[in-house]
Image (spheres, rainbow, N blue to C red):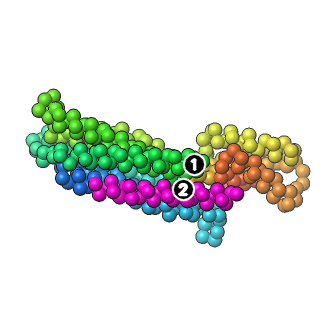
Amino acid sequence: MATQNGDSTKRLESRSLGVAMWGNLFMAAAGLVAGVLSNSNAIMMDGLFSLIGFGSALLGRRISRRIDAGPDKARPYGYAADEAIFSTFRSLSLLGLVLFAITNAIKNVYNYLSGMTPEPLNFAPMIIYFAGIGLVCAILWGFHHFTWRRTGKRSAILRLEAKAAMFDGLITAAAGAGLGAIYLFRDGPLAPVAPVGDSVIVLLLCLLAIGSYVREFRGGLGELAGASARPEYVATARRSLRSAIAEDGGELQDMSVTKLGRTFLVTVYYDPRRPMSASDIDKLNLRMIEDARKTLTGADVLLLITEHPRRWPDALNPF
């Protein structure tokens, strides 16, 4: 059953990412063409976001196919880290694009204040672009979000792709509203900023987005660094192991929980208070894995027989 569920998750995830690939490729082409025709940096930036989205969906699809593969000679700890690596560098690439867009927008505003008049915006292609791209972003967000829910909310890849589609849609809507306001009031109250209106919009949108991508980047980096999982996950793991420990009669010395992609590694430092055979240790370890997976999907348990917690006492550690 677990294998069937895993195969079903892979199929759903692969289908969602396939839709994301072609949707982002269409939006990237539309953004670059519309950006050139309209002389709009805001639309050009929107197209570049979509181009990165195409590349990430292509890479994410390849990672998804082998994410549940077990340990082998090449990867003794399995392939779970690939998802955290993907999320980290996906966020980093988006951060780089945001910083590039901020720099370019500031440069355009500075040049305008210095007396250089930019090329005027051509508003004709914008209406079709914003309507079409807004619809595509909404479809992609819905597809990713509901697939993420159907797969048990485990996929960091789908969660990040859904967030990227939602943000792309918000950028498109905000840019459309801002450029529309500039078009309507270019001879009125917005006349002073109309020539660099799209650069101002790009700057504001990027400043709003940068915090979200920084959080995603820090979260992925923390997983790769082996940082402890969130307190609620630690508490859930501790509760799930109480029954096995109580029945065995030993004492829990310490426990750590780390998250890597969609998997959890629960390390149990356990003193059985009696001699145990290797077979007894294996049975207890498998029981803990079974109990942990009832509350933490994809969890694995490493059982260490010891009378000490995760850090050696100073009196025993010569190093």
Q: Where on the picture, by quarter, is residue 57? A: bottom left
Provide the major secondary structure of the magenta segment: helix
Q: Which residue is mark 1?
A: 150
Please tell me how crowded label 2 is: few (under 14), some (14-19), or many (20+) other residues with Cα within 10 Å.
Answer: some
Visible in this render: residue 62? yes
CA separation in Å, label 1 and label 2: 8 Å
Image disc number at residue 12: 2
User: Residue visible at 38% across and 55% down?
Assistant: 23
User: Residue visible at 79% across and 52% down?
Assistant: 287
Visible in this render: residue 95? no
Q: Give the percent coordinates (x, y) of residue 184.
A: 17, 34
Between 14 and 268, the one nearer to me in the picture: 14
Q: Give the percent coordinates (x, y) of residue 29.
A: 29, 57
Image disc number at residue 19: none
User: Residue visible at 20% across and 39% down?
Assistant: 197
Q: Give the percent coordinates (x, y) of residue 318.
A: 72, 54
- Magenta region: 1-30
Task: Please state which amino acid type lies under the numbered disc 1.
Answer: Arg
Between 98 and 218, the one nearer to me in the picture: 98
In the rendered image, the quadrant that contains the N terminus is bottom right
Task: Please state which amino acid type lies under the numbered disc 2.
Answer: Leu
Q: How many marks?
A: 2
Q: Give the percent coordinates (x, y) of residue 145.
A: 49, 46
Element marked by disc 1: helix
Badge 1 vs badge 2, beta-carbon distance below 8 Å: yes
Between 228 and 41, the one nearer to me in the picture: 41
